[in-house]
Amino acid sequence: MGRDQWRAALRNPVGAAAAGLLVLLAVLAVVAPILWGDAAEETDPAALSQGSTSEHPLGTDALGRDIMLRVLVATRYSLGLALLATAICVVAGVLLGVLPAVLGRRAGRLVTGTVNLAVAFPGLLLALFFAVIFGVGARGAVLAIGLAGAPSFARLVQTNVAAVSGRDFVAAARLAGVGRFRLVARHLLPNIGEPLVVNATVMAGSALLAFAGLSFLGLGVQPPAYDWGRLLGEGLDRIYINPAAALAPGVAVVVAGLAFTLLGESIAQVVGVRAVRRRRPPVGDQAAAAAAAGSAPETPGDTVLVADDLRVGFPAPRGGWTYPVDGVGLTVRPGETVGIVGESGSGKSLTALAVAQLAPDTADVTAARLEVAGVEPRGRPESEVRELLGTKVAMVFQDPMTSFNPSMRVGTQLAEVTRVHEGQGRRAALARAVDRLRTVRVPAPERRAHQYPHEFSGGMRQRAMVAMGLMSTPELIIADEPTTALDVTVQRQVLRLLKDVQAETGAAVVLISHDIAVVAQLCERVVVMYAGRVVEELPVGQLGAAAHPYTRALLASVPDLATDRERPLATIPGRPPDPADRPEGCAFAPRCAFADDACRVRPGLAAVAPEQRAACWHPRSQPLDLVLDVLSGGRS
């Protein structure tokens, strides 16, 4: 939390009162044993078990010791033990919470299941269970309370880590080759710190109450030591003789517990926080899909990316598998610019994530062949894959705001790539980051490198993302709709920047976009995807001779200066199919004016012209300017 947030929490009357009580308790914890420690131990045989008097305002205990002084002196021990138990709870909870992100999938699921099982038991029951295991006494009670609260804290950490793990800046860090432990320490935990602080503060109050309860039951602090819980138990035996003997430690426990809880709630209001065994797809389905996809294109030896029959599957809610990416074939040569176009949900981005080994953990990625920069990443040790992807592949994500870790300065994030893979020192890595920001034309790069992502404009953030990819010497740059959130002027600047970077580095570029006009401006070859499959592949120069009705419909839906304003804009009727309910034959058939009985069988990619292939039983050959008539129901 920043200073402004702390100040806002303390400006809240409840937060200010709670903070004031905690400060008072902290002062008492420090000075009370020094000022009254000896006096609290003095016995007075002439004043055994007395009620309130001028000399002893709260009376005396069975040995004639002053109860008020003992309550004040017990502040240090009571708060100290509660905070120690909270620290154990937080440390154990954080470790258990981040383990699923560090361990493998099976071990991570085992840890998650164990935490879920422990959360199902009441915290007090767990505390009593651990108290019996660790034995009677302050040490056993501290361990019992700390470990009893760890499962709920671990659940909180797991939930927040899972939410942050899906952000683009985490995917960017993985692509840069950042190891699991460094990923947790630098990118995950700093971005979930606020809810952890809030819940740790509230948990301190709960730990105080729980510790007092164990001491009251005789399982906590043992004589001659004492805390508020033990004083409460002793005073309760004489509650009818001297009620103040039990009331004073009870009030101390309640006030301290409320102070921690209310401060946590005040902070929460400021920061806005209130508090499968993996199934494998059947081999038969893969073989059938490979046969239906048709023959893969011949791939020359000099390629930077080869994907043959790439499939990405997810477990379906009712059993079986759903394939948002189904049999994609893609080849990219060094220095080539390839565009992947299609409507939202066509599988463009998921294809790129699968190629970059960034597909979600629940996904099953298979391919007859998959090579990136001449290396097959599947089946290799994680360290080798990180090294490959961190140095050979750069990825520019769609949303520049979520592409950076908001808690780290931009220069530090760029420098991390070099520090991880080349072992450079902090200064040298930061100097390279500044140089790369200058390369992508970020003004005042020295100053910008020390700023946070929210201080950059959208266009500047996207430029910085390109600069991150250039921290090494990538052979492949994957740009996933890099201009979606930008205005037209900045879009043109970013596209020109990608072209300039490609010219300088010789890297291949895969540009993913739903806008076929943008792809036509930048790319040399276009791959059209629909419903998770490639339906056409052709050079940009041959777009005017597109053969697949879907490609022609996409082109027709792009207005230009020559578009007849008297006619309605062309649209594609219907909507793309759900991957879980895709037609057995041609997926575009329900929206196609040329569909017939032949389209009930899935077509494979077949050559329709030199360097052009289409997956269609009825490839078009008429001039593209007639496509409007086609969309309105005409046939050639």
Image (cartoon, rainbow, N blue to C red):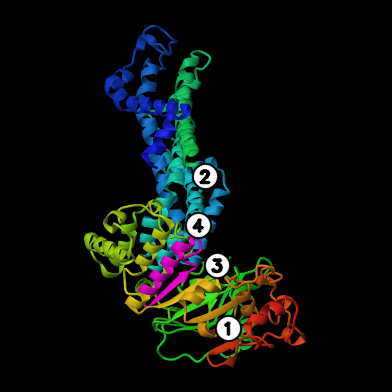
Please, what is the three-letter code of the amino acid marked with disc 3? Thr
Per the image, is 480 magenta? yes
Rendered image: mark on residue 111: none
Q: Quadrant of the C terminus?
A: bottom right
Residue 123 placed where, x, y %?
53, 42
Q: Residue at x 36, y 31 (%)?
A: 77
Q: CA distance from mark 3 to mark 2?
A: 32 Å
Please, what is the three-letter code of the amino acid marked with disc 2? Leu
Disc 4 target residue? 162
Please, what is the three-letter code of the amino acid marked with disc 4? Ala
Q: CA distance from mark 3 to mark 4?
A: 13 Å
Q: CA distance from mark 3 to mark 1?
A: 40 Å
First in sequence: mark 3 vs mark 4: 4
Callout 3 touching callout 1 (CB < 8 Å): no
Q: CA distance from mark 2 to mark 4?
A: 26 Å
Secondary structure category for the residue under label 1: helix
Residue 52 placed where, x, y %?
43, 9
Disc 2 target residue? 126
* Residue closest to the far top: 54
First in sequence: mark 3 vs mark 1: 3
Disc 3 target residue? 362
Please, what is the three-letter code of the amino acid marked with disc 1? Gly
